[in-house]
Amino acid sequence: MTYLKEIDVKTILITGSAGFIGANLVKRLLITDSPVQIVGLDSVNDYYDVRIKKYRLESLKQVAVAHPDSSYIFVKGNIADKALIGRLFAEYSFDVVINLAAQAGVRYSISNPDAYIESNLIGFYNILEACRHSYNNDKEGVQHLVYASSSSVYGSNKKVPYNTDDKVDNPVSLYAATKKSNELMAHAYSHLYGIPVTGLRFFTVYGPWGRPDMSPFLFADAVLHDRPVKVFNQGDMLRDFTYIDDIAEGVIRCIDRVAEPDPAWNAECPDPACSSAPYRIYNIGNSEPVRLMDFIAAVEAACEKEAVKEYLPMQPGDVYQTNADTSALQRDMGYKPSKDIREGIRETVAWFKSYYHLE
């Protein structure tokens, strides 16, 4: 049995608001949840092309102007800056905190591990501490912390689809290890200080406004410019690709539905969603894994060009497949993804062509 309560949300902090998921979430909230006050925080680092991040921020300004009942305030800064986080919490008294800021990328974590420790561990610790102290002096404090985890925590698990009941004790990349650490840290703070927390394990997000280091953009760019598409593990891989609108919808459904301690909890309970703390964790995915070669075929169809393919071995830190069991999110939040992969890729490639003036 799931124990949830509804809250009244007025002021939201969204970290990573210039990022792919963050910017789309801000946009959806401004349009659908008016009136709401959103404070967006992002370091706008150069992990990938900063121009795309600036494009998203400029687009959000236009959305905010069109919805004057709500407000969007952008702050440039790093969640690893503890003093900055403290000032923001003191000034705005957030009802909800959505922590999406993180150093992403499995392969990049091999060559640049320091970035993952700074953002994913120190930065997340700062967010947890700020939430903890938001209750000082008998203040109501943060009513819900929602944070981004990742399907990477499942590592090379053979059992599919991945369920939140599954053990995730064997990460195969530092990125995955930091995300699993986030889940452990969040549960500890939820248990110790009563912070209502929901963790979301995202599965391969794609769509317009997307990241240029992700396969949809890499493949579209290669096909449209007659460069070889790098096909890892000789094409024998599967991914649970999830369209950005479905991701944003899932997050929004979680915001005002807050976990409460489960009175049925006991030490033998195998389900991480069953806890004596006000803590839940969910998968957000499409639940229909796509073979890599079928995904490339969808990109080729959208680009109206055949790809030149360069077949390569599996890369360090990669996994053979991802596959989300989203039944818990559907049960608790009524969540069900709706975007077909072919339609999603068409819309993604159309945006790609428009953004890079390739029409």
Image (spheres, grey):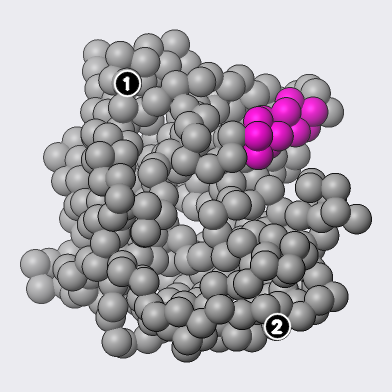
What residue appears at the point 17 percent right and 68 percent down from the top-left corner?
A: 169
Please state which of residues 20 and 214 is positioned toward the viewer in this rendering. 214
Position of 236 compared to 195: left or right? right
Is 38 positioned to the left or the right of 77 in the image? right
Residue 263 painted magenta: no
The C terminus: image quadrant:
bottom right
Question: Measured from the top left, where is residue 23 in percent x and y?
Answer: 62, 40
Q: Residues within 10 Å of mark 2 (few under 14, many from 20)?
A: some
Give the x, y percent position of residue 261.
26, 53
Label 1 neighbour load within 10 Å: few <14, some 14-19, many 20+:
some
The answer to whether one can see residue 182 in this image is no
Q: Tell me the quarter of the image containing the N terminus.
A: bottom left
The answer to whether 177 is drawn above or below residue 114 in the figure is below
Q: Is residue 170 above or below residue 157?
A: above
Instruction: Nearest to the eye among marks 2 and 1: give it.
Output: 2
Residue range (magenta): 51-64
- Which residue lies under the disc numbered 2? 297
Task: Measure the C-alpha gap from mark 2 to mark 1.
Answer: 44 Å
Task: Choose top left, top right, bottom left or bottom right for residue 164.
Answer: bottom left
The front one of 216 and 60 is 216
Q: Earlier in the sequence, mark 2 or mark 1?
A: 1
Q: Is residue 15 visible?
A: yes
* Residue type, mark 1 in image: Asp
| Residue at which label 1 appears | 81
Given residues 323 and 32, the one toward you in this image is 323
Residue 262 in which image quadrant: bottom left
Q: Amino acid at mark 2?
A: Ala
